[in-house]
């Protein structure tokens, strides 16, 4: 398989259903951690001016609005978010898929609030369509360890690369000494690993 290193110039960020109500379904990891990591991804995208597509499902119901942290960091992407009426697989919803295609990027970073529903289906479909997909596992979670395990296995088997926020930021940065790298390492220490950052300081 041909692999092109993910960079700010060839990658788009997709944030799927990080809504205040849906966050409550996360049980296998700390949901506050998942929220924090999804917001860190939004900050990374802002630093890099990376195209970002946000989608939500049934905001007027129990799922609720997108996390305020994401909305505040990426206001334009939030305003332009794709509001799905109830279609489970975001990739199967034409407005979302078309918004992703409009970025012109073939490398996709995906984070979905629930691994076993919101993330798995679009990640697999995009990978099968020829996109290089990295799924950020600590920015999502599942109601049980079992559903998380099976979802990760299915994505892996379909060619989705499973990663974590810190690994992804390091890959995108490539060089901490550059101006952008300095911003990203600061993000890493202040948002992703605040305890580590305090220790180094």
Image (spheres, grey):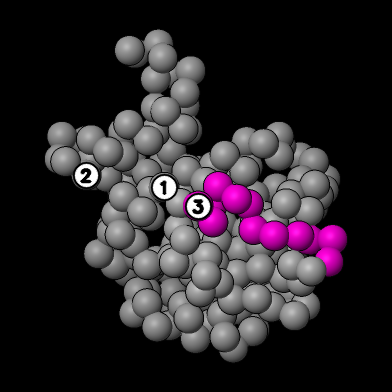
Q: How far apart, in angstroms, are the residues tagged by discs 3 and 1? A: 10 Å
Residue 4 sits above or below residue 115 on the image? below
Q: Quadrant of residue 196?
A: top left
Residue 167 sits above or below residue 77 on the image? above
Q: How far apart, in angstroms, are the residues tagged by discs 2 and 1? A: 12 Å
Which portion, as a residue range, is magenta?
A: 61-72
Horizontally, is 64 left or right of 68 in the view? right
Closer to the chain start, of discs 2 and 3, is 3
Closer to the chain start, of discs 2 and 1, is 1
Q: Position of residue 46 (x, y in %)?
A: 36, 54
- Marks 2,1: beta carbons within 8 A: no
Horizontally, is 63 left or right of 166 in the view? right
Residue 124 sits above or below residue 165 on the image? below
Q: Position of residue 113 (x, y in %)?
A: 67, 55
Q: Position of residue 82 (x, y in %)?
A: 59, 76
Q: How far apart, in angstroms, are the residues tagged by discs 2 and 3? A: 21 Å
The 10 Å Cα crowd at callout 1, few under 14, some 14 to 19, many 20 or more, is: some
Q: Secondary structure at mark 1?
A: helix
Q: Quadrant of residue 90?
A: bottom right
Q: Which residue is label 1 attached to? A: 43
Task: Tell me what residue is drawn at x 78 percent, y 61 percent.
Answer: 63
Q: Is residue 48 visible?
A: yes
The circle drawn on residue 72 is 3
Q: Position of residue 186 (x, y in %)?
A: 32, 31
Residue 23 sits above or below residue 182 on the image? below
Q: Is residue 137 visible?
A: no
Q: Which residue is label 2 attached to? A: 180
Horizontally, is 186 left or right of 146 in the view? left
Q: In the image shown, does 133 or 104 lie closer to the viewer? A: 104
Closer to the chain start, of discs 3 and 1, is 1
Q: Secondary structure at mark 3?
A: helix
């Amino acid at each position: 398989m041909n692999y092109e290193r993910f960079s700010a110039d060839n990658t788009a960020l997709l944030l799927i259903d990080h809504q205040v109500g849906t966050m409550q379904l996360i049980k296998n990891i700390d949901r506050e951690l998942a929220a924090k990591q999804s917001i860190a991804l939004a900050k990374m995208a802002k630093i890099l001016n990376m195209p970002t597509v946000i989608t939500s499902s049934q905001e007027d119901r129990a799922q609720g609005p997108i996390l305020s942290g994401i909305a505040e960091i990426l206001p334009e992407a939030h305003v332009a978010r794709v509001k799905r009426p109830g279609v489970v697989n975001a990739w199967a919803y034409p407005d979302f898929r078309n918004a992703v295609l409009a970025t012109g990027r073939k490398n996709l970073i995906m984070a979905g609030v629930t691994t076993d529903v919101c993330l798995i289906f679009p990640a697999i479909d995009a990978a099968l369509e020829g996109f290089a997909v990295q799924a950020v596992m600590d920015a999502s979670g599942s109601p049980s360890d079992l559903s998380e395990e099976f979802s990760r296995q299915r994505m892996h088997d379909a060619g989705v690369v499973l990663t974590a926020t810190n690994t992804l930021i390091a890959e995108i940065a490539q060089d901490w000494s550059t101006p952008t790298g300095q911003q990203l390492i600061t993000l890493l220490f202040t948002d992703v690993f605040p305890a580590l950052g305090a220790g180094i300081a």
